[in-house]
Image: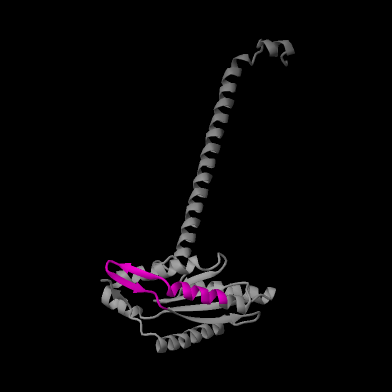
Protein backbone atom coordinates (compact mmCIF):
# COMPACT_ATOMS: atom_id res chain seq x y z
CA UNK A 1 0.00 0.00 0.00
CA UNK A 2 1.49 3.39 -1.08
CA UNK A 3 2.09 6.00 1.63
CA UNK A 4 -0.28 8.95 1.78
CA UNK A 5 0.95 12.35 0.54
CA UNK A 6 0.87 13.66 4.11
CA UNK A 7 2.92 10.74 5.36
CA UNK A 8 5.45 11.29 2.55
CA UNK A 9 5.80 14.96 3.52
CA UNK A 10 6.02 14.40 7.24
CA UNK A 11 8.25 11.42 6.92
CA UNK A 12 5.68 9.13 8.48
CA UNK A 13 6.31 6.44 5.92
CA UNK A 14 7.53 2.86 6.05
CA UNK A 15 10.52 4.08 3.92
CA UNK A 16 11.32 7.11 6.07
CA UNK A 17 14.26 5.39 7.75
CA UNK A 18 15.89 4.77 4.35
CA UNK A 19 15.70 8.44 3.24
CA UNK A 20 18.82 9.73 5.04
CA UNK A 21 21.09 7.00 3.66
CA UNK A 22 19.67 7.51 0.15
CA UNK A 23 20.38 11.23 0.35
CA UNK A 24 23.91 10.56 1.53
CA UNK A 25 24.50 8.17 -1.36
CA UNK A 26 23.20 10.74 -3.85
CA UNK A 27 25.33 13.43 -2.24
CA UNK A 28 28.35 11.16 -2.26
CA UNK A 29 27.75 10.27 -5.90
CA UNK A 30 27.47 13.92 -6.92
CA UNK A 31 30.63 14.77 -5.00
CA UNK A 32 32.55 11.97 -6.70
CA UNK A 33 31.29 13.09 -10.12
CA UNK A 34 32.30 16.69 -9.37
CA UNK A 35 35.79 15.64 -8.34
CA UNK A 36 36.10 13.58 -11.53
CA UNK A 37 35.00 16.54 -13.65
CA UNK A 38 37.45 18.86 -11.90
CA UNK A 39 40.32 16.43 -12.50
CA UNK A 40 39.31 16.12 -16.16
CA UNK A 41 39.21 19.89 -16.61
CA UNK A 42 42.59 20.25 -14.90
CA UNK A 43 44.11 17.67 -17.26
CA UNK A 44 42.62 19.47 -20.26
CA UNK A 45 44.05 22.80 -19.03
CA UNK A 46 47.48 21.20 -18.48
CA UNK A 47 47.37 19.66 -21.98
CA UNK A 48 46.45 23.02 -23.53
CA UNK A 49 49.29 24.73 -21.65
CA UNK A 50 51.76 22.09 -22.84
CA UNK A 51 50.59 22.51 -26.44
CA UNK A 52 50.89 26.31 -26.17
CA UNK A 53 54.42 26.00 -24.78
CA UNK A 54 55.46 23.56 -27.51
CA UNK A 55 54.00 25.80 -30.23
CA UNK A 56 55.87 28.79 -28.79
CA UNK A 57 59.10 26.77 -28.77
CA UNK A 58 58.54 25.68 -32.38
CA UNK A 59 58.01 29.32 -33.43
CA UNK A 60 61.15 30.36 -31.52
CA UNK A 61 63.26 27.68 -33.22
CA UNK A 62 61.82 28.58 -36.63
CA UNK A 63 62.67 32.23 -35.99
CA UNK A 64 66.23 31.31 -34.98
CA UNK A 65 66.62 29.29 -38.18
CA UNK A 66 65.75 32.38 -40.24
CA UNK A 67 67.68 34.97 -38.19
CA UNK A 68 71.33 36.02 -38.20
CA UNK A 69 72.48 35.63 -34.60
CA UNK A 70 75.11 38.40 -34.81
CA UNK A 71 72.99 41.26 -36.17
CA UNK A 72 69.42 40.14 -35.49
CA UNK A 73 68.57 40.61 -39.18
CA UNK A 74 67.17 37.89 -41.40
CA UNK A 75 69.76 35.42 -42.62
CA UNK A 76 70.10 34.26 -46.23
CA UNK A 77 67.51 31.53 -45.85
CA UNK A 78 64.97 33.90 -44.31
CA UNK A 79 65.63 36.52 -46.98
CA UNK A 80 65.23 34.07 -49.86
CA UNK A 81 61.88 32.96 -48.39
CA UNK A 82 60.73 36.59 -48.17
CA UNK A 83 62.03 37.38 -51.66
CA UNK A 84 60.00 34.52 -53.13
CA UNK A 85 56.91 35.73 -51.32
CA UNK A 86 57.39 39.35 -52.41
CA UNK A 87 58.06 38.52 -56.06
CA UNK A 88 55.00 36.24 -56.10
CA UNK A 89 52.90 39.09 -54.69
CA UNK A 90 54.42 41.46 -57.27
CA UNK A 91 53.26 39.14 -60.05
CA UNK A 92 49.80 38.80 -58.52
CA UNK A 93 49.25 42.52 -57.92
CA UNK A 94 51.48 43.94 -60.69
CA UNK A 95 53.91 45.55 -58.22
CA UNK A 96 57.54 46.61 -58.61
CA UNK A 97 60.55 47.23 -56.39
CA UNK A 98 64.33 47.20 -56.14
CA UNK A 99 66.81 44.72 -54.69
CA UNK A 100 70.02 46.21 -53.31
CA UNK A 101 73.19 44.27 -52.46
CA UNK A 102 75.73 45.79 -50.04
CA UNK A 103 79.27 44.44 -49.72
CA UNK A 104 81.84 45.97 -47.37
CA UNK A 105 85.18 47.04 -48.84
CA UNK A 106 88.40 46.28 -46.94
CA UNK A 107 86.62 44.21 -44.29
CA UNK A 108 89.23 41.42 -44.23
CA UNK A 109 92.05 43.62 -42.84
CA UNK A 110 89.76 44.71 -40.00
CA UNK A 111 89.15 41.07 -39.04
CA UNK A 112 92.77 40.00 -39.56
CA UNK A 113 94.52 42.95 -37.90
CA UNK A 114 92.05 44.11 -35.25
CA UNK A 115 90.36 40.82 -34.39
CA UNK A 116 86.98 39.21 -34.99
CA UNK A 117 85.36 41.01 -32.07
CA UNK A 118 86.10 44.32 -33.77
CA UNK A 119 84.85 42.92 -37.07
CA UNK A 120 81.63 41.76 -35.42
CA UNK A 121 81.12 45.22 -33.89
CA UNK A 122 81.53 46.78 -37.34
CA UNK A 123 78.96 44.38 -38.82
CA UNK A 124 76.47 45.25 -36.08
CA UNK A 125 77.02 48.96 -36.80
CA UNK A 126 76.38 48.35 -40.51
CA UNK A 127 73.16 46.50 -39.71
CA UNK A 128 72.00 49.30 -37.39
CA UNK A 129 72.80 51.96 -40.00
CA UNK A 130 70.89 50.10 -42.70
CA UNK A 131 67.81 49.72 -40.48
CA UNK A 132 67.89 53.44 -39.69
CA UNK A 133 67.99 54.39 -43.37
CA UNK A 134 65.30 52.19 -44.92
CA UNK A 135 61.54 52.25 -44.66
CA UNK A 136 59.77 50.08 -42.11
CA UNK A 137 58.23 47.89 -44.81
CA UNK A 138 61.54 47.15 -46.56
CA UNK A 139 63.30 43.80 -46.02
CA UNK A 140 66.87 43.72 -44.67
CA UNK A 141 69.15 40.70 -44.29
CA UNK A 142 72.74 39.70 -43.73
CA UNK A 143 73.26 37.11 -46.45
CA UNK A 144 76.97 36.42 -46.02
CA UNK A 145 80.05 37.35 -44.02
CA UNK A 146 80.08 41.05 -44.92
CA UNK A 147 77.22 41.05 -47.43
CA UNK A 148 73.78 42.54 -46.85
CA UNK A 149 70.62 42.59 -48.94
CA UNK A 150 67.82 45.16 -48.90
CA UNK A 151 64.52 44.70 -50.69
CA UNK A 152 62.85 48.05 -51.35
CA UNK A 153 59.26 46.94 -51.90
CA UNK A 154 56.34 48.62 -53.66
CA UNK A 155 58.41 51.30 -55.35
CA UNK A 156 59.45 52.35 -58.83
CA UNK A 157 62.93 51.60 -60.16
CA UNK A 158 63.84 55.30 -59.96
CA UNK A 159 62.60 55.78 -56.39
CA UNK A 160 64.13 52.48 -55.22
CA UNK A 161 67.45 53.43 -56.77
CA UNK A 162 67.40 56.79 -54.96
CA UNK A 163 66.67 55.04 -51.66
CA UNK A 164 69.52 52.58 -52.23
CA UNK A 165 72.00 55.35 -53.14
CA UNK A 166 70.96 57.36 -50.09
CA UNK A 167 71.61 54.28 -47.93
CA UNK A 168 75.04 53.78 -49.50
CA UNK A 169 75.94 57.40 -48.74
CA UNK A 170 74.80 57.02 -45.14
CA UNK A 171 76.97 53.93 -44.72
CA UNK A 172 80.02 55.56 -46.29
CA UNK A 173 79.69 58.53 -43.94
CA UNK A 174 79.71 56.28 -40.85
CA UNK A 175 82.70 54.98 -38.93
CA UNK A 176 83.45 52.81 -35.90
CA UNK A 177 85.79 54.03 -33.18
CA UNK A 178 87.72 51.48 -31.15
CA UNK A 179 89.97 53.31 -28.70
CA UNK A 180 92.44 55.22 -30.87
CA UNK A 181 91.45 53.25 -33.97
CA UNK A 182 89.02 54.77 -36.48
CA UNK A 183 87.37 52.33 -38.92
CA UNK A 184 85.42 53.97 -41.75
CA UNK A 185 82.63 51.95 -43.34
CA UNK A 186 83.12 51.53 -47.06
CA UNK A 187 80.24 49.89 -48.91
CA UNK A 188 79.82 48.85 -52.55
CA UNK A 189 76.26 48.65 -53.86
CA UNK A 190 74.50 46.63 -56.54
CA UNK A 191 70.99 47.56 -57.65
CA UNK A 192 68.52 45.36 -59.54
CA UNK A 193 64.90 46.47 -60.13
CA UNK A 194 62.13 43.88 -60.29
CA UNK A 195 58.68 43.90 -61.84
CA UNK A 196 55.80 41.47 -62.16
CA UNK A 197 57.09 38.11 -63.32
CA UNK A 198 60.73 38.59 -62.25
CA UNK A 199 62.48 35.36 -61.26
CA UNK A 200 63.93 35.74 -57.72
CA UNK A 201 67.11 33.77 -58.49
CA UNK A 202 67.80 35.85 -61.60
CA UNK A 203 67.13 39.01 -59.57
CA UNK A 204 69.71 38.02 -56.95
CA UNK A 205 72.28 37.26 -59.67
CA UNK A 206 71.74 40.69 -61.27
CA UNK A 207 72.10 42.49 -57.93
CA UNK A 208 75.27 40.53 -57.14
CA UNK A 209 76.82 41.29 -60.54
CA UNK A 210 75.95 44.98 -60.22
CA UNK A 211 77.56 45.07 -56.79
CA UNK A 212 80.86 43.67 -58.10
CA UNK A 213 80.85 46.22 -60.92
CA UNK A 214 80.44 49.00 -58.34
CA UNK A 215 83.21 47.51 -56.21
CA UNK A 216 85.57 47.53 -59.20
CA UNK A 217 84.81 51.18 -59.95
CA UNK A 218 85.26 52.19 -56.31
CA UNK A 219 88.62 50.42 -56.02
CA UNK A 220 89.94 52.38 -59.01
CA UNK A 221 89.12 55.78 -57.52
CA UNK A 222 89.61 55.15 -53.80
CA UNK A 223 92.66 53.99 -51.87
CA UNK A 224 91.28 54.69 -48.40
CA UNK A 225 92.86 52.41 -45.76
CA UNK A 226 90.69 49.91 -43.89
CA UNK A 227 91.39 51.77 -40.62
CA UNK A 228 93.59 54.48 -39.18
CA UNK A 229 95.09 55.42 -35.81
CA UNK A 230 94.16 58.72 -34.23
CA UNK A 231 96.96 60.98 -33.00
Nearer the observer, 71 or 13: 71
Which of the two residues, 118 or 218, is positioned nearer the viewer here?
218
Residue 227 in sight in this render = yes
Residue 47 in the image, given as x and y percentages of width and height: 50, 49
| Position in image of residue 190 (x %, y %) | 50, 82
Q: How is the image coloured?
A: one colour
In the image, residue 181 lies in the stretch drawn in magenta: yes
Q: Residue at point 30% right, 69% down? A: 117
Is residue 4 at all visible to an observer of this figure?
A: no
Q: Is residue 193 above or below residue 44?
A: below
- Which residue is drawn at the image coordinates 49% and 87% (left, top)? 209
Q: Quadrant of residue 144?
A: bottom left
Q: Quadrant of residue 1?
A: top right
The reply, left or right, for residue 69 in relation to residue 47 is left
Q: Residue 5, relative to residue 126: is it above or below?
A: above
Dividing the picture into quadrants, the one containing residue 22 is: top right
Q: Residue at x 53, y 85 (%)?
A: 206
Range drawn in magenta: 162-186
- Quadrant of the image for the C terminus? bottom left
Residue at (35, 78) in percent of width and height: 107
The x and y percentages for residue 46 are 49, 46
Q: Is residue 99 magenta?
A: no
Residue 199 percent location from the top left of the image: 59, 82
Relative side of 214 to 195, left or right: left
Amino acid sequence: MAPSPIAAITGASPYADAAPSLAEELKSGKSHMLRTLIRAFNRIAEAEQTITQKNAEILRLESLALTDSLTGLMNRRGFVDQLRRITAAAERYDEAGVLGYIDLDNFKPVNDDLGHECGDELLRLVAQTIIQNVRQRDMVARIGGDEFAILFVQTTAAQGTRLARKLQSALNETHLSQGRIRIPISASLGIAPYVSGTDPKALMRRADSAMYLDKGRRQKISREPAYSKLN
